[in-house]
């Protein structure tokens, strides 16, 4: 699997702000939004362009746009905090939504919502979720996408655990990963170490 770690100094600084347990929900949300801009920027680096003629106030030239804008799919809840920033950077994108909660005891993903275009054939999909821990939630989400014909999926995660990267890579699914960090490991509760805690709770409060 293609893994791109975005270790730009600004990305490291925003991720550090997310990691810092002293920071409140508003500070965490702002840092996630800003980091998402950087991750989506990198995720679209090799996106094919379509060309067309345009006139500047001075001369004729060639203009560019994304040939096939991605479908953005935030994974609820935590991925919601990435949705607006991603859409700001790619305003022509369509959006779908998946609700996925990890059972706190078994660590298994439980899908509870799916609102996606009927067909994803020929369309790049960007899945937005701050955390790739065991990988269960992302694998399950991407299976929902491939069932609709997706074959070009980019998982965009603030943070990943090596165990999750391995699981995603071994899944055989058509996915690449863009993340700001691959951390050390998972702990016994399947939390990423050093990580940042629970990205849903850090943004919106514990449920
Ligand atoms: C978190 C996170 C991922 C998932 C990662 O969501 O946002 O979706 O867990 O874990 P995994 O890789 O082991 O599956 P959570 O289930 O806490 O739900 P939330 O977004 O509603 O807080």
Image (spheres, grey):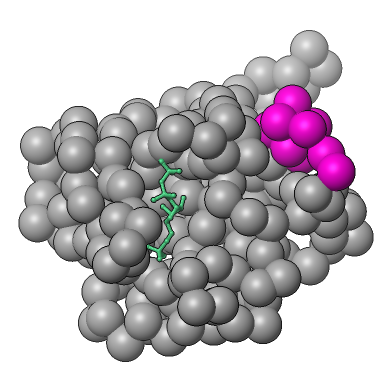
Quadrant assignment, res 202: top right
Reply above or below: 200 against 186. above
Extreme-top residue of the structure: 57
User: In what quadrant of the picture does the N terminus appear?
Assistant: bottom left
Closest to the observer, 33 or 205: 205
Tell me if 33 is positioned left or right of 98 in this view: right
Residue, x 74% and y 26% (percent of image)?
Answer: 26
Q: In this view, does 33 lie above or below 152?
A: above
Point out residue 37 in the picture as x, y percentages from the top left corner: 68, 41
Residue 128 drawn above or below residue 183: above
Q: Residue at x 27, y 40 (%)?
A: 98
Q: Is residue 157 visible in this depiction of the protein?
A: yes
Q: In this view, does 185 lie to the left or right of 9?
A: left
Tell me where residue 11 sits by quadrant: bottom right
Residue 54 position, x and y percent, is 61, 23
Q: In this view, does 75 lie above or below 134?
A: above
State the residue in front, 159 or 187.
Answer: 187
The image shows a total of numbered marks equal to 0
Magenta span contains residue 196 = no
In the image, is 144 to the left or to the right of 46?
left
**Camera sees residue 67:** no
- The quadrant in which the C terminus is found is top left
What percent of the width, then of the height, locates residue 23?
83, 39
Q: Does the magenta stretch include residue 25?
A: yes
Q: Is residue 131 left or right of residue 112?
A: right
Q: Which portion, as a residue range, is magenta?
A: 22-31
Query: Magenta region, mostly helix, strand or loop?
Result: helix
Please name the residue shown 52% across and 58% down the image.
Answer: 131
Q: Where is residue 76 in the image (x, y as percent from the top left)?
A: 38, 38
């Amino acid at each position: 699997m293609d893994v791109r770690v975005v270790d730009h100094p600004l990305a490291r600084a925003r991720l550090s702000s997310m990691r810092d347990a002293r920071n409140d929900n508003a500070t965490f949300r702002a840092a996630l939004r800003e980091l998402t801009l950087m991750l989506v920027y990198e995720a679209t680096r090799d996106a094919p362009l379509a060309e067309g003629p345009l006139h500047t106030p001075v001369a004729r030239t060639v203009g560019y746009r994304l040939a096939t804008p991605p479908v953005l799919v935030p994974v609820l809840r935590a991925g919601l905090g990435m949705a607006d920033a991603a859409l700001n950077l790619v305003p022509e994108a369509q959006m779908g939504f998946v609700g996925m909660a990890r059972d706190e005891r078994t660590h298994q993903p439980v899908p509870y919502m799916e609102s996606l275009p009927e067909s994803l054939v020929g369309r790049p999909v960007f899945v937005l979720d701050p955390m790739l821990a065991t990988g269960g939630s992302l694998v399950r989400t991407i299976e929902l996408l491939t069932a609709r014909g997706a074959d070009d999926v980019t998982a965009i995660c603030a943070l990943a655990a090596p165990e999750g990267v391995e699981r995603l890579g071994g899944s055989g699914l058509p996915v690449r990963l863009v993340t700001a960090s691959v951390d050390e490991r998972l702990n016994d509760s399947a939390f990423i170490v050093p990580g940042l805690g629970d990205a849903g709770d850090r943004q919106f409060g514990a449920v």
